[in-house]
Image (cartoon, rainbow, N blue to C red):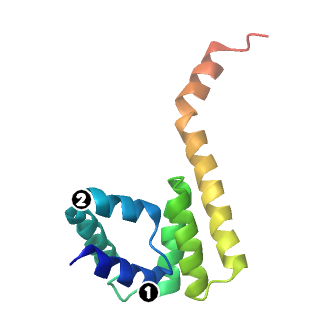
Amino acid sequence: MEKEKVFEQLKKEMGEVPKPIENLASLDMNVLMGHLEAKKNAYAGDHLDKKTKTLIALAAGIALDSQGCIMTNVQAAKKSGASTAEIMEVFSIVKFSKSSSAMSGFAMAMEWLIAEGDDE
């Protein structure tokens, strides 16, 4: 599919063509097409509704610190019927999950510090 047709379709779906997509198209259209095919496959199932899928994608974007994904998926979630309260709840869950992950990652160091005893 030629670049202009891809961009036209993305504008219809997303309202715009994100800059990283434009850049990828300029560098390697085959890689972009693979990415878009993966997106199509990820959203193809019918067990979850579109709003739920966009909220999951938003959570992943937040967890991975991807500004572009966050903004794109906030807009997609709103377009799919998510409320601001639902979006903020997703943010709250991810924020908690990331802090839990940090604590878990620091667990061995905490055990070592406890075993070493108080140095004060």
Q: Provide the residue designation for mark 1.
A: 12
Q: Number of marks in the image?
A: 2
Q: Provide the residue designation for mark 2.
A: 28
Q: Amino acid at mark 2?
A: Asp
Query: Which corner quadrant of the image does residue 44 belong to?
Result: bottom left
Neighbour tally class for label 2: few under 14, some 14-19, many 20 plus, Cα within 10 Å: few
Residue 27 lies, in percent from the top left, at 27, 56
Residue 28 lies, in percent from the top left, at 24, 59
Name above or below for residue 110 compared with residue 87: above
Quadrant housing the C terminus = top right
Question: In the image, what residue occupies the spot 20% across and 78% down?
Answer: 1
Residue 78 lies, in percent from the top left, at 61, 82
Q: Amino acid at mark 1?
A: Lys
Q: Nearer the viewer, residue 59 or 78?
A: 78
- For the residues labelled 1 and 2, the Cα–Cα distance comes to 22 Å
Neighbour tally class for label 1: few under 14, some 14-19, many 20 plus, Cα within 10 Å: few
Residue 81 lies, in percent from the top left, at 60, 89
Q: Give the mark nearest the N terminus, 1 or 2.
A: 1
Question: In the image, what residue occupies the spot 47% across and 86% down?
Answer: 50
Query: Which corner quadrant of the image does residue 85 belong to?
Result: bottom right
Q: SS for tag 2?
A: loop
Question: In the image, what residue occupies the spot 30% across and 64% down?
Answer: 25
Q: SS for tag 1?
A: helix
Question: In the image, what residue occupies the spot 50% across and 71% down?
Answer: 56
Q: Nearer the viewer, residue 85 or 8?
A: 8
Q: Nearer the viewer, residue 11 or 63?
A: 11
